[in-house]
């Protein structure tokens, strides 16, 4: 699930193997599983999104960090650049269609065509159920559902034209099983799966792959406010009897962003220690 939930989660390329694709300023070839790819990660300034950005950068991608948190976003971009990666921070509201157009134009000019989109940005306002008010419903739906749609709408035309690209949409185990409370959140994440499958089928002929991941209980700094008793109760229901780590989710993101997954699209991958099998 999302960074803002006690169930944390944060949402590709053409056929071929990883190798030498881009030359750095120092003249050395960049190597890695996503070397030469340009990736946008939304909600990437902190938490799970930052883990995805770091993992993609380590594997050779140029990473555009898109968020509404300038200070941590700029610090992360500087950290990645200091480690030898190409990275930039972009102040970006995923619910704003015009902002998506501007973001894609900026990245195209700065880094080149976009190969990967990780729709990670998400929010959860903890209602108990149908008591959720209109403001909560609209906020959660705007970020978690509309934001994913707008992101895909912004990048797919360029990917389809080049016949190469992959989108990783971050859903949640809450999209796969019923959980008590937070009905707007669960509805928005179920919608992400519909968006994923629909786009995968529609744009597969253009070699644009669209997949979704469904994280379960994953520890991030955003889960610090969760009740230890509630977390322990959740762990007791997980077959692996533990929570997950952000890097375990990011490993799936890198795989789906890489050419290793070139024959995978419309997939929904739980990353939950086996929780949804119960």
Image: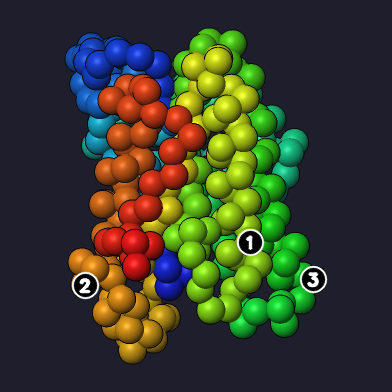
Residue tagged by mark 1?
A: 187
Q: Is residue 113 visible?
A: no
> Can you identify the residue that label 3 sits on?
134
Q: Nearer the viewer, residue 211 or 45?
A: 211
Quarter of the image where one finds residue 20: top left
Q: Which residue is mark 2?
A: 241
The crowd level at tag 2 (other Cα within 10 Å; few <14, some 14-19, many 20+) is: some
Q: Spot the residue most to the bottom.
A: 229
Instruction: Look at 27% across and 61% down and name the residue there.
Output: 273
Residue 158 % position (x, y): 59, 17
Which residue is painted at 50% across and 52% down in the image?
Answer: 171
Classify mark 3: helix, strand or loop: helix
Depth check: give the residue in front, 34 or 242.
242
Residue 179 image offset from top left, x and y in percent: 51, 73
Mark toward the viewer: 3 or 1: 1
Q: Is residue 236 visible?
A: yes
| Sequence-first tag of 3 and 1 | 3
Say whether marks 3 and 1 touch (CB < 8 Å): no
What is the x, y in percent for residue 21?
29, 12
Picture disc at residue 84: none
Q: What secondary structure is marked by label 2?
A: loop
Q: Secondary structure at mark 1?
A: helix
Q: Residues within 10 Å of mark 3 (few under 14, many from 20)?
A: few
Q: Nearer the viewer, residue 57 or 258?
A: 258
Vertical comparison of 128 with 146: above or below: below
Q: Position of residue 77 (x, y in %)?
A: 39, 41
């Amino acid at each position: 699930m999302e960074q803002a939930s006690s169930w944390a989660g944060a949402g590709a390329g053409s056929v071929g193997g990883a190798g030498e694709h881009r030359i750095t300023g120092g003249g050395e070839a960049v190597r890695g599983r996503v070397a030469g790819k340009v990736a946008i990660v939304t909600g990437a300034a902190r938490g799970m999104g930052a883990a995805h950005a770091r993992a993609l950068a380590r594997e050779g991608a140029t990473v555009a960090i898109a968020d509404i948190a300038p200070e941590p976003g700029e610090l992360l971009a500087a950290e990645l650049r200091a480690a030898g990666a190409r990275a930039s921070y972009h102040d970006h509201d995923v619910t704003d269609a015009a902002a998506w157009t501007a973001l894609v134009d900026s990245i195209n000019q700065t880094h080149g065509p976009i190969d990967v989109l990780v729709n990670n940005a998400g929010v959860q306002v903890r209602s108990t159920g149908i008591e959720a008010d209109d403001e909560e419903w609209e906020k959660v739906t705007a970020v978690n559902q509309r934001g994913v749609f707008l992101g895909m709408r912004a990048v797919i035309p360029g990917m389809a034209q080049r016949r190469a690209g992959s989108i990783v949409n971050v859903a949640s185990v809450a999209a796969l099983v019923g959980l008590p409370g937070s009905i707007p959140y669960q509805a928005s994440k179920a919608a992400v799966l519909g968006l994923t499958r629909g786009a995968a089928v529609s744009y597969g002929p253009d070699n644009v792959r669209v997949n979704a991941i469904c994280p379960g209980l994953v520890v991030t700094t955003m889960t610090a406010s969760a009740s230890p008793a509630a977390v322990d109760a959740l762990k007791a229901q997980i077959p692996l009897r533990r929570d997950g780590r952000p890097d375990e989710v990011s490993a799936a993101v890198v795989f789906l962003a890489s050419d290793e997954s070139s024959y995978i699209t419309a997939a929904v991958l739980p990353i939950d220690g086996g929780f949804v099998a119960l």
